[in-house]
Amino acid sequence: MERVDDRDRVLGVVGRRQAVREGWLHRVAVTVCRDERGRILVHRRSEQLSRFPGHYEVVVGGAVGVGESYEQAAARELAEELGIHVLPRLLFTFVNRSGLSPHWLGVHEAIVPDTVVPDPDEIAWHGRLTEPELRSALREWRFTPDSHEAFSRYLAFRTARS
């Protein structure tokens, strides 16, 4: 992965473990997945994952690889984790300090088909929730820190655009 500075400029190539351990900024791309009716795909992370096992997530994503754009990484993650091939649209980026270590988070949106094939090594369960149902779930279920931060900023972004 690429270590980046506070302006999201590449400083060099580092390993993810080292970036997290040292608190170095790096890039992560995530996508809010909606269906044609506006429901949002939510999933529970596998218990075998090293980071936030069993937690729920509002977004699908992961680290941006060396030389990848946020959009390329988001599309790759959707293919790997959900078995779908769509082009997510980058909405905004920000420095997220709510997870294991600080990172630039590129938040995307995509309309995804009703049928997805989640990778069982990554995703233990998935479903679709309306925005009111999701707001309730965010208060009651155990979500990843990125989910709370990304979704609140996503809603603010959508509100500002309407």
Image (cartoon, rainbow, N blue to C red):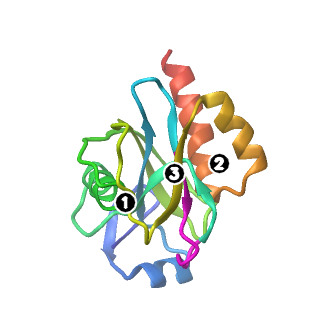
Q: Residues within 10 Å of mark 3 (few under 14, many from 20)?
A: some
The residue labelled by disc 3 is 126
Q: Nearer the viewer, mark 1 or mark 2?
A: 1
Across and down, in percent, residue 17 comes to 47, 83
Residue 13 position by quadrant: bottom left
| Separation of residues labelled 2 and 3 (CA atoms) | 17 Å
Could you classify mark 2 by the number of other residues whose Cα lies within 10 Å: few (under 14), some (14-19), or many (20 or more)? some
Question: Identity of the amino acid at label 1?
Answer: Glu
Q: Residue at x 55, y 83 (%)?
A: 21
Quadrant in which the N terminus is drawn: bottom left
Residue 38 rendering spot, x and y as whole percentages:
48, 26
User: Given the image, on which type of amino acid does mark 3 rest?
Assistant: His
Name the element at disc 2.
Answer: helix
x%, y% of residue 52? 61, 69
Instruction: Look at mark 2 in the image and give the residue it sits on.
Output: 148
Disc 1 or 2, which lies upstream in sequence?
Answer: 1
**2 and 3 marks in contact (CB < 8 Å):** no
Q: Who comes first in sequence, dot 1 or dot 3?
A: 1
Nearer to the camera, 14 or 38: 38
Q: Answer above or below: position of 3 versus 144.
A: below
- Mark 2 or 3, which is nearer the eye? 3
**Residue type, mark 2 in image:** His
Say which mark, if any, is on residue 81: 1
Q: CA distance from mark 1 to mark 2?
A: 20 Å
Q: Are marks 1 and 2 in contact (CB under 8 Å)?
A: no
Q: Pick whichever of labels 2 and 3 is earlier in the sequence.
A: 3
Residue at the right extreme? Answer: 140
Magenta residues, start to end: 42-51
Circle 1 Cα neighbour tier, 10 Å, few/some/many (<14 / 14–19 / ≥20): some
